[in-house]
Amino acid sequence: MKMMTREAALSPRTLLKMAVSLVLFAAPPASAAGQDEPVSDHMTVVYEGTRYALTRQLQADELRALLAGNTLIFIHPDGQEQEYHLESGQTLNGWAASQEASTGFWQIEGDEVCWTYISGTHCKPLYQSEREDLYGQVPGWYDAPLALIWEPGDSRGMKQRSIKENSI
């Protein structure tokens, strides 16, 4: 029986290389996200009882085209929040069940939309879904992305509502 001498002992560097090789070559092959797995609830939105995958984040130029002069309807668990985005950067925001609106501002910073109201400013990315005119705000206000739909112009008559809070 041979005894290993001190000179034959493995160096810490050699042991580390062996451990990395073992992990790389012994581990099962990995799949790209979304392959052979159900769609994650964290990158989907539910609208009218159907779940839709969020396919990609919108870029700054796409966000401007989506928002300027148009309305977003955010689908909250307790109702629809409607927000008209004037081309000037002003917003008119209110709940579907109300005839009042709050004024604020919107702007694009990087690839996120930033909204400013009395309560403060928050910036969030928007994602396109697999359904036309349906988007997701990630992160949403809840445990999952918040669904929102796009409508052209002041489709919900926000300019005709009385103003309850004014951030301008």
Image (tube, grey):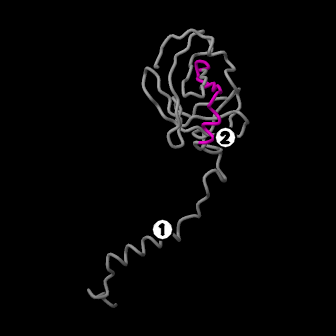
Q: Quadrant of residue 121?
A: top left
Q: Nearer the viewer, residue 67 or 133?
A: 67
Q: Residue at position x 52%, y 18% from top?
A: 103
Q: Residue at position x 26%, y 86% from top?
A: 6
Q: Tell me the residue that label 1 is attached to.
A: 23
For marks 2 and 1, the one nearer the N-term is 1
Would residue 79 be counted in the magenta stretch?
A: yes
Measured along the vertical axis of the image, is residue 79 above or below residue 43? above
Q: Residue furthest front?
A: 88
- Between the residue at mark 2 and the residue at mark 1, the CA separation in whole angstroms equals 33 Å
Could you say whether the residue bearing mark 2 is in a helix, strand or loop? strand
Residue 13 locus on image (x, y percent): 34, 76
Under mark 1, the amino acid is Val
Q: Which dot, 2 or 1, sits closer to the camera?
A: 2
| Part of the protein shown in magenta | 61-81
Would residue 70 be counted in the magenta stretch?
A: yes
